[in-house]
Image (tube, rainbow, N blue to C red):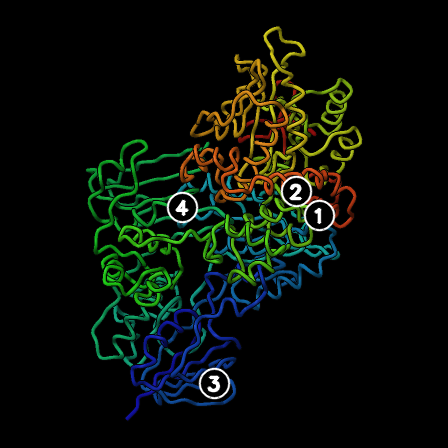
Amino acid sequence: MTRTLVVIGYGMVGHRLTDLLRDSGWRIVVFGEESRPAYDRVALSSYVDTWSSADLELPALTGCELRLGEKVVSVDRDRRVVVGASGVEVTYDALVLATGSVPFVPPVPGRDLPGCHVYRTIDDLDEIRATVEAASRPGRKSGMVLGGGLLGLEAANALRGMGVSPHVVELAPRLMPIQVDEGGAGLLKRLVEKLDLTVHTGTSASSIERDGSRLIAKLASGLELDLDVVVFSAGIRPRTELDLGLPLGPRGGYLVDEACRTSDPHVFAIGECAAVEGVTYGLVAPGYSMAEVVADQLAGGARVFPGADVSTKLKLLGVDVASFGDAHATTEGALEVVVNNAVAGTYSKLVVSDDARILLGGVLVGDASSYLSLRPLVGKEVPAALLQPGGAVDVEMPADAQVCSCLAVTKQTITDAIVSGVACDVAELKACTKAGTGCGSCVPMLKKLLTECGVEQSKALCEHFTHSRAELFEIVRATRITTFSALVEKHGTGRGCDICKPAVASILASLGNGHILGAEQVSLQDTNDRFLANLQRNGTYSVVPRIPGGEITPEKLIVIGEVARDYGLYTKITGGQRIDLFGATVDQLPEIWRRLVDAGFESGHAYGKSLRTVKSCVGTTWCRYGVQDSVGLAIELELRYRGLRSPHKLKSAVSGCARECAEARSKDFGIIATENGWNLYVAGNGGFTPRHADLLVSDVDTEQLIRVIDRFLMFYIRTADRLQRTAAWLEGLDGGLDHLREVVVDDKLGICADLEAAMESHVSDYADEWRGVLEDPEKLARFTSFVNAPGTPDPTISFRAERGQRVPVSLGIPEVVR
């Protein structure tokens, strides 16, 4: 006789259980309250990219009866009957509760006002979108997310995708207080605040009031926020409103034993609604583990819940964050090894036992590439190298270590599949081992294991494009595709990500596809490109006008001084021979640009992956040692290559003699004058890993010099990987400098004419991006203060006096009145 299993709840965990049991011989009936099939709730914020729910749907299941849009209203445990809202009754032999959780909404007065939402489902996001679109504020809207944990930052990311500048309000003194320690949270805050997001920690919302079409949120700190939308994402609570008469855990959730069985032997609970021996879990990996336990129990096995791996690795607003094991060093006698590199924007902490032998846990922010190697070592002896300054973290993973914590797949299982020939790529590994089919954070390790096992790996840009950046460049150039959506539709999959979107935006810009803030282009950009200015630590922006070759007239100097004075901007002469103006708010940017453009200035592209400056000495104009006109050449080169979008920033310099005062050999392309002409050096850089440039050609005249530079730059732009400087590109180029010389000097590939034509097209099509905004009302409307009406100072931005100028306020330093 066929037994009937009823599953209440069709989220990710309910889907997993059903998938495991569909060939078990049970008749499976699933009640799903939402009208749509199960979808990837972990990737919910990505719904904003396309507004297509189909992109999030989990694989369709067969062999079960799905009752979507049917809420269960009661369960009669004596009769073993489940009753749906439509009146349908289903008798069960076993019942599994997978009802998940509900958002926790703090008791803030005004929380029920129109414009206030929770963040949990696709329907929630649709409602948030409707509120944002109905907002009357011109330009960029303003929102508040109450909750600075994992879900709160995900919600903030979703708001950013809707064109909203979000404030994140967190009661704890730091972001992500459960997963990240104080040091890591401090760096996380700095990194996310560079992304048009304002963080308020150690405070809460005391009330929300309606003011016309806006919402006013009053914080306990005394600050008032002028908002268009409010999102509550302050945690979750197990969903247990069904009156089953079952015991609950101390913090909610149906109380279950290690077999995930409730006090009723016919009723199980899994996922967020379950309290396994009193403990609830809000992550998908423990839920999947519970589903596997119940599937085994229903098949006659004796599997029990092995405990939860609450490690997390994710990318929040483009920032890598990971924590694993005893991240907060709560173990008695635990020691901490911390490396906080503020310059590189990375933070790492390892927690070890009191004898420094056993790895207990850790926290990684900014760079979580070592997470997959470190997490499996928790509870094992830690390699001594890890505890040394700059110690290597690429340690060998033991065979029994779990690579995929969502589905408990070990390294041994994966390597066996590779070595046996069953799987030769990531897709096949996913299919045969299920690794990488959960949250997906272990996919990079799958690629690494394939490489270690001798399987050649793809150079795909990301999971959405199987092509490399260089291949995508050629596809766009050949097909004349002008939008990301068209490219991903014809040559990729999915919706794109924070890897491929900016990369494609750069390719489109390199090929002259209109203004960088065009209708679709703007959605691909990061904050700096979106506002044509560099975001600073206090939420203001810097304005950097172009000063070709460092040459400037007294009249233009006076204009810069007047602008800085009138807007209270901090001024700094840079090593690139130009003047940076710091402290401008978003709505001040067009006003400042207008005055600078009217005076003959243009954008210096300090915000873009493009040419920054061509530095110069004074050459033969003034210097008694100069042998060539370095100033004239520097100006000519900077005006020629201005606005040239590339895989990474480009810097150049021209020295008028061998004394090298312009430091040309530390640049991406540098020129040094000789008695007979010019020497061209390429692929140098300063920064974190300095590299002297290599001599490409010598004693060439100006015409030939420019021709070779044109070819070099266009060849680099076409063939480099995303975010790859010329130094790393040349070092990774097959044949190195000799091959580069054969291509761009000797024309071995016969492409030099094409490279030169591409550069000429860039030169002829160049247009100043600042002027482009000033002449376009639609683009201009985006530059509006995200807290107050245009022209009203943002109350969260403060300054102090230092050496006669205004600088951002730091904690404990008194402010100056603005």
Which kind of residue does numbered mark 3 sit on?
Gly
Tell me if label 1 and label 4 are in contact, CB under 8 Å.
Answer: no
Q: Residue furthest bottom?
A: 1
Q: Which residue is mark 2?
A: 531
Alpha carbon separation for disc pair 3 and 2: 52 Å
Q: Label 1: how many residues lie within 10 Å, few (<14), some (14-19) or many (20+)? A: many
Whichever of callouts 3 and 4 sits on the residue coming sooner in the sequence is 3
Q: Is residue 212 left or right of residue 668?
A: right
Tell me if label 2 and label 1 are in contact, CB under 8 Å.
Answer: yes
Residue closer to the observer: 221 or 526? 526
Residue 382 visible from this viewpoint: yes
Alpha carbon separation for disc pair 4 and 2: 31 Å
Alpha carbon separation for disc pair 1 and 3: 49 Å
Q: Label 3: how many residues lie within 10 Å, few (<14), some (14-19) or many (20+)? A: some
Disc 2, SS: helix
Alpha carbon separation for disc pair 3 and 4: 42 Å
Residue 430, relative to residue 395: is it above or below? below
Q: Which residue is mark 3?
A: 84
Image location (x, y in percent) of residue 453: 26, 53
Q: Residue furthest top?
A: 624
Which kind of residue does numbered mark 2 sit on?
Phe
Which mark is nearer the camera, 1 or 3? 1
Q: Residue 782: which disc?
A: 1
Which kind of residue does numbered mark 1 sit on?
Arg
Q: Residue at x 49, y 24 (%)?
A: 666
Q: Which residue is mark 4?
A: 180
Which kind of residue does numbered mark 4 sit on?
Val
Whichever of callouts 1 and 4 sits on the residue coming sooner in the sequence is 4
Residue closer to the observer: 468 or 775? 468
Residue 31, relative to residue 48: is it above or below? below
Image location (x, y in percent) of residue 527: 60, 44
Whichever of callouts 2 and 1 sits on the residue coming sooner in the sequence is 2
